[in-house]
Image (cartoon, rainbow, N blue to C red):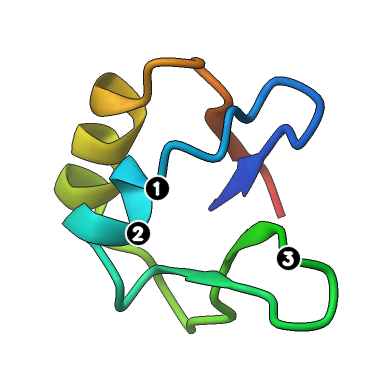
Amino acid sequence: MRPVIDHLRCTDCESCLSLFPHIFHRNEDTGLIEVMDLPEYALEEVGQAISMCPADCIEWQKT
């Protein structure tokens, strides 16, 4: 599984970026916050990002 961001709901608050910059980054070309391509994702860290997201726009997606 990997985390994904629903860009239609994202308010660009940057909470995920400030909490976990090794998982989330801003795409310089699009300006959107994206999930970095990693071989695996820490369940606890992504879970915390999901719970802290005020727009509720981060969720797990099966790969």
Q: Residues within 10 Å of mark 1 (few under 14, many from 20)?
A: some
Q: CA separation, marks 2 and 3?
A: 13 Å
Task: Assign a secondary structure to mark 3.
Answer: loop
Q: How far apart are marks 3 and 1 (CA)?
A: 12 Å
Question: Which numbered tag is attached to residue 35?
Answer: none
Kind of residue indicated by mark 2: Leu
Q: For mark 2, what is the residue? A: 17
Q: Earlier in the sequence, mark 3 or mark 1?
A: 1
The x and y percentages for residue 58 are 52, 33
Residue at x 43% of width, y 37% of height: 13
Of pointers 2 and 3, the one earlier in the residue sequence: 2
Whole-Å distance between the Cαs marked 1 and 2?
A: 5 Å
Q: Do the residues labelled 1 and 2 touch (CB within 8 Å)?
A: yes
37 with respect to 63 (left or right): left
| Residue 34 horizontal/vertical position (percent) | 62, 62
Res. 32 image quadrant: bottom right
Mark 2 is surrounded, within 10 Å at the Cα level, by few (under 14), some (14 to 19) or many (20 or more) other residues, namely some
What residue do we see at 36% from left, 25% from top?
Answer: 53
- Residue at the location (24% across, 25% down)? 52
**What residue is rendered at 34% in x and 48% in y?**
16
The amino acid beneath tag 1 is Glu
Judged from the image, the secondary structure of the residue bearing numbered disc 2 is helix
Pointer 1 residue: 14
Instruction: Give the SS element for disc 1.
Output: loop
Residue behind mark 3: 31
